[in-house]
Amino acid sequence: MVRTVYDPLKSEDEMTIKWPHVEVDPHCDREDVNGVKEFYSDSHVQARDFDGAVPFYVDCVTQLLVSMEPGSLFEFGCNAGRNLHLLSQKLPHARLYGVDVNRDAIDFGREYFNLPIEYGDELFLEKLAEDSFEVTFTVSVLDHIPFIEEVARKLIQITSRYLVLYEICYHRFGKITQMATADGEIVDGYPFSYFHDYDGLFRKLGTWCVLDVALPAFPGNLGEFYRLKVFSKHSADIGKQLLKRIAFSPLHPSSR
């Protein structure tokens, strides 16, 4: 169900865009910094494996990453590494690496996927050298961190070419307090979910946004707010090269 969301900064005539219902509190609590780590360090919300059914959005994100032909790839918030496992099949010669706060997920991924992934949070990024990886990426990770300024700075620092983000985006920033289900029911927001000003933040960090497309993950809740963004560390010309190389292959029927 789609509803018009009132924006006090716009006139009624300007309110022509309809959004899935969402309520946002612009004030984030500093106590959430530790709360979100505790919640996701013991969470089983995300399945450890795709079990043969790769979601459409994952197919798109991984195809984009493969089109970049990276020699090295890092996922911040990799859980058990199911995204990295898919990429390892399409980029057999690339150096893959990941980190996550969920120790059980990391142990599973090491044993089940045989992946070089580590347990850790944003402080782990301090251990990585500048330009450690050609491409770094996140899949719905930064939207669960209340304050991302330092994380964003470090992600850019360890990246030599592209930073790819698949995160929920909106024109208001802050903590999500309410949202609508696919049936139109208004419910509380997911624990520790936030909208951030990615474009403004990464622009201040000296990067260029070279790709920005809407890519909903699923109907209702926050699924319709996801966007796929690519930031270049060098210049807009790098973005032109990227766009020339993107070529999505036909999707497998099971992923539609």
Image (cartoon, rainbow, N blue to C red):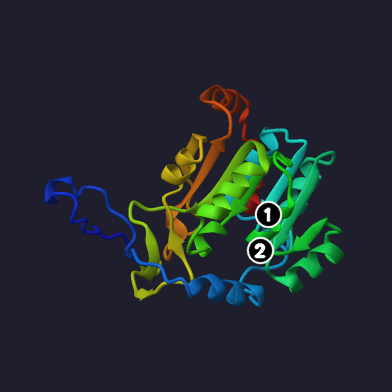
Left or right placement of residue 152 versus residue 225 in this view: right
In the depicted structure, whether residue 219 falls above or below residue 197: below
Total numbered badges shown on the rendered structure: 2
Left or right placement of residue 176 versus residue 111 in this view: left
Left or right placement of residue 27 versus residue 138 in this view: left
What residue would you read off at disc 1? 125
Secondary element at tag 1:
helix
Residue 57 shows in the view: yes
Dividing the image into 4 quarters, which one contains the N terminus? bottom left
User: Label 1: how many residues lie within 10 Å, few (<14), some (14-19) or many (20+)?
Assistant: some
Secondary element at tag 2:
loop
In the depicted structure, whether residue 9 falls above or below residue 232: below
Q: CA distance from mark 2 to mark 1?
A: 8 Å
Position of residue 37 measured from the top left corner of the image (x, y, whole percent): 60, 72
Q: Residue placed at 24% from the left, 57% from the top?
A: 4
What residue would you read off at disc 2? 121
Q: Residue placed at 34% from the left, 74% from the top?
A: 185
Q: Which mark is residue 26?
A: none
Position of residue 112 measured from the top left corner of the image (x, y, whole percent): 84, 64
Position of residue 224 measured from the top left corner of the image (x, y, whole percent): 43, 56
